Amino acid sequence: MTAPGARRADRDRDPAGRARNARPRDASGRPLPPGESGVERVDEDVVLPPSESLAEAQRLLDGGYPFHAHEVLEGAWKSGPDDERPFWQGLAQLAVGLTHEQRGNRRGAASLLRRGADNVTEGAATGTGHGVDAARLAAWAQQRADAVEAGEEVGAGGPPRLRD
């Protein structure tokens, strides 16, 4: 057992000493056993300008990698101005909701899709929508949550369009 506050020597760490899991991951972001090949990972500390964050997140969503899209959107959320954080948090929550859906966690998926819809709407109300039609995206997320709760096929309807 490790003492409170002590670092475990067997944990992967980055140069700053923060815990990082270097194990490969599958398309849903689940860690795979050491030595197995996984999908290319997104840097956990990625920070891109808003338009690039949205474009990269869309590329990942279109490719079936919502967990990875979440990493990109979370970078924008955590590094952006305070008044934009609810918007980016909402987008990241939508991606996590899709990750839960992909993993078969319907309850978590519906909950995060709804929470993400609320945050995207609230965040865009401040005028920081970066070309995202928040009302359309929130409606999509609410419909997707309803479909997930109704037991419809996972991934039905494809990924959301972040921008038109």
Image (tube, rainbow, N blue to C red):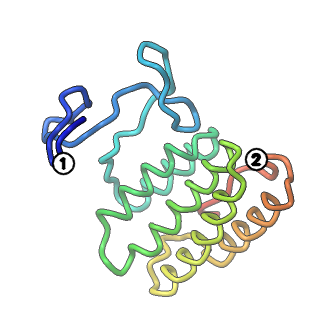
Task: Please give the name of the residue rendered at 49% of the width and 17% of the height, measured from the top-left corner.
Answer: 37
In this picture, residue 89 sits left or right of residue 20: right
Q: Position of residue 104 (x, y in %)?
A: 71, 44
Q: Earlier in the sequence, mark 1 or mark 2?
A: 1
Q: Which residue is mark 1?
A: 4
Residue farthest toward the top in the current orientation of the protein: 35
* Amino acid carrying mark 1 in the image: Pro
Image-quadrant location for residue 79: bottom left
In this picture, residue 9 sits left or right of residue 92: left
* Amino acid carrying mark 2 in the image: Gly
Task: Please give the name of the residue rendered at 42% of the width and 51% of the height, measured from the top-left corner.
Answer: 72
In the depicted structure, whether residue 139 falls above or below residue 32: below
Q: Which residue is mark 2?
A: 155
Question: How far is mark 1 from mark 2, CA to CA?
Answer: 42 Å
Label 2 crowd bin: few (<14), some (14–19), many (20+), radius 10 Å: some
In front of the other: label 1 or label 2?
1
In the depicted structure, whether residue 22 falls above or below residue 126: above
In this picture, residue 144 sits left or right of residue 59: right
Q: Position of residue 65 (x, y in %)?
A: 58, 40
Q: Secondary structure at mark 1?
A: loop
